């Protein structure tokens, strides 16, 4: 019962026929799966298993291996013939196309199909997914009365025992799936022809490589793209960048003088061409004049879990578990450092985070953050969930100043920033002696993943050394802010 296409390879073909072909014949060219991606896959599996509680008591036909569904197909067929009311991972195959459905529920003489996703809304790719499932199941003789996507309801807030019925929301996509059926048939014929060819399809790189998600063959298909290319022009339309690239203009320096640049691109392109630096002393001085001592340089780290673990927590809510705080009492004083890292096993970190933050920040002086929208939103959510601290947390928000602004406004810009103004680009451009590369934990996503594992008891590494690594990473974030403000002071 070998198949030519599966639901996942069908989706690859919709995105890119070259990716479909490479996946079938050149799997060795796929990008290495990084730990953060593995965590996302694992989370999706956990969500799927939890959603089964919406329809309890079913038979589970998850295959022993991902590559052999023959047993699952036979088990599914037998269970349907016997009238089993609920089936998990029901498997079907028709005309060389394989699909597996998360939950199949009997509804009188018909069946309802449910596909579970770990997102908070139904996406276009989910409709494509469900459409090919419907095609296969209908041709296998399954009479479906409805097709639905099960997603997470991020308005749900945990209150006592987890309520699975409230955690998920179910959205029927039946009409949209029916509307796609002629397209599904055409695609299947086309994709089979692709896979029967002896040649790799010629497909140009472009926006589809990363939209709506990164293709796993980007490393192969983009291997000849310069590290800093026209695709790196900030906020450029990807189709416009693709047109430049495929017309032989690959680097920013190669863009012709007569090319009609958008105002937002002019600084980046011109600075790259003539290696110039932009310093707007008036803008930088205006920024500095709003600062009041003692200066507090603050950075948060958060975890984001699909399923809430704690009271007053929403799905995917960013829960702060750590901060670093450098304090400069006056212009000539040394810099002090304070920090907080929550306990790492089964304890809501938010109350201790709030109490320590209020204590460490005091009640006067500016609080510098990098990208104020993030820290402000986190504190506003803490106010919502712990209203008894509303006054103190609002006072912290009122004192916040965004250190990102002078770089975002191009008051200080160098070619090394490559059109970006995030701290991961600005810091090495202005302070090359400081680097995240030597740290065990190098970026916030990894910090969040590691602490989530520690928080939920799934971490298998050395907790003591990992906590040290978390502290070192967050500390560098705020020390970087101290050094960037010094750079601003130098050029004024």
Image (cartoon, grey):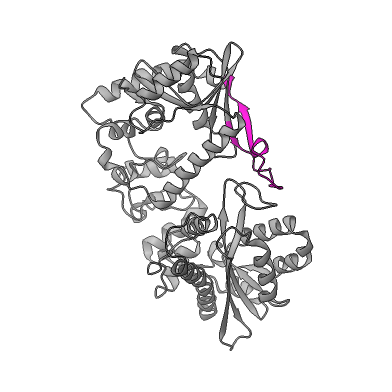
Q: Can residue 202 be seen here? A: no
Q: Position of residue 164 (x, y in %)?
A: 64, 38
Identity of the residue drawn at 39% across and 61% down? 272
Report whether 270 appears left or right of 395: left
The magenta segment: 150-175
Q: Residue at x 30, y 34 (%)?
A: 23
Give how far across and how far down residue 441 sits, in percent: 43, 64
Vertical relation: 431 (above or below) 89: below
- Residue 238 lies, with reference to residue 88, above or below; the image says below
Out of 475 and 351, give the one closest to the viewer: 351
The answer to whether residue 430 is seen in the rendering is yes
Task: From the viewer's perspective, tell me whether residue 384 is left or right of residue 256.
Answer: right
Residue 164 is covered by the magenta coloring:
yes
Position of the C terminus, as image quadrant, is bottom right
Residue at 35% in and 23% down? 70
**Looking at the image, which residue sits at the far left?**
198
Quadrant, the N terminus? top left
Q: Nearer the viewer, residue 233 or 483?
A: 483
Horizontally, residue 90 falls left or right of residue 171, namely left
Question: From what the image shows, is residue 190 above or below residue 209?
Answer: above
Q: How far across and how far down the image is residue 275, in percent?
A: 38, 66
User: Compared to 196, does 24 lie above or below?
Assistant: below
């Amino acid at each position: 019962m070998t198949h030519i296409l599966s639901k996942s390879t069908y989706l690859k073909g919709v995105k890119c026929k070259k990716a479909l072909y490479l996946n079938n014949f050149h799997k060795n060219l796929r990008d290495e799966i990084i730990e953060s991606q593995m965590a996302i896959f694992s989370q999706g599996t956990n969500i799927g298993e939890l959603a089964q509680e919406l329809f309890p008591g079913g038979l589970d036909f998850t295959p022993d291996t991902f590559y052999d569904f023959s047993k699952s197909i036979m088990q599914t067929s037998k269970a349907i013939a016997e009238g089993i009311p609920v089936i998990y991972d029901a498997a079907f195959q028709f005309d060389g196309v394989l699909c597996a459905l998360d939950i199949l529920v009997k509804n009188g003489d018909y069946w309802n199909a449910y596909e579970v996703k770990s997102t908070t809304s139904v996406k276009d790719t989910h409709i494509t997914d469900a459409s090919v499932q419907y095609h296969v199941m209908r041709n296998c003789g399954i009479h479906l009365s409805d097709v639905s996507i099960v997603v997470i309801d991020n308005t749900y807030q945990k209150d006592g025992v987890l309520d699975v019925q409230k955690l998920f929301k179910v959205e029927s996509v039946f009409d949209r799936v029916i509307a796609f059926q002629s397209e599904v048939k055409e695609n299947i014929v086309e994709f089979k022809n692709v896979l029967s060819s002896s040649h790799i399809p010629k497909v140009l790189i472009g926006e589809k490589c990363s939209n709506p998600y990164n293709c796993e063959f980007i490393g192969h298909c983009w291997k000849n793209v310069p590290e800093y290319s026209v695709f790196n022009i900030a906020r450029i339309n990807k189709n416009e960048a693709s047109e430049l690239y495929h017309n032989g203009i690959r680097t920013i320096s190669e863009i012709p003088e007569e090319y009609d640049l958008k105002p937002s691109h002019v600084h980046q392109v011109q600075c790259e061409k003539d290696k110039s630096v932009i310093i707007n002393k008036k803008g930088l001085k205006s920024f500095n004049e709003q600062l009041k001592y003692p200066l507090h340089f603050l950075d948060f780290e958060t975890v984001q879990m699909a399923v809430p673990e704690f009271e007053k927590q929403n799905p995917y809510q960013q829960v702060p578990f750590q901060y670093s705080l450098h304090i400069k009492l006056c212009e000539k004083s040394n810099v002090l450092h304070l920090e907080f890292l929550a306990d790492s096993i089964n304890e809501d970190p938010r109350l201790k985070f709030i109490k320590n933050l209020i204590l460490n920040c005091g009640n006067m002086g500016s609080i510098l953050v990098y990208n104020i929208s993030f820290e402000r939103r986190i504190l506003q959510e803490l106010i919502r969930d712990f209203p008894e601290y509303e006054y103190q947390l609002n006072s912290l928000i009122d004192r916040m100043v965004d250190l990102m602004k002078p770089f975002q406004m191009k008051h200080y810009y160098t070619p090394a920033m490559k059109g970006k103004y995030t701290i991961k680009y600005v810091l090495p451009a202005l302070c090359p002696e400081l680097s995240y590369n030597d740290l065990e934990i190098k970026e916030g996503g990894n910090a969040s993943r590691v602490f989530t594992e520690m928080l939920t008891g799934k971490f298998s590494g050395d907790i003591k050394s990992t906590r040290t690594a978390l502290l070192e990473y967050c500390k560098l974030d705020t020390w970087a802010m101290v050094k960037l403000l010094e750079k601003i002071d130098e050029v004024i």
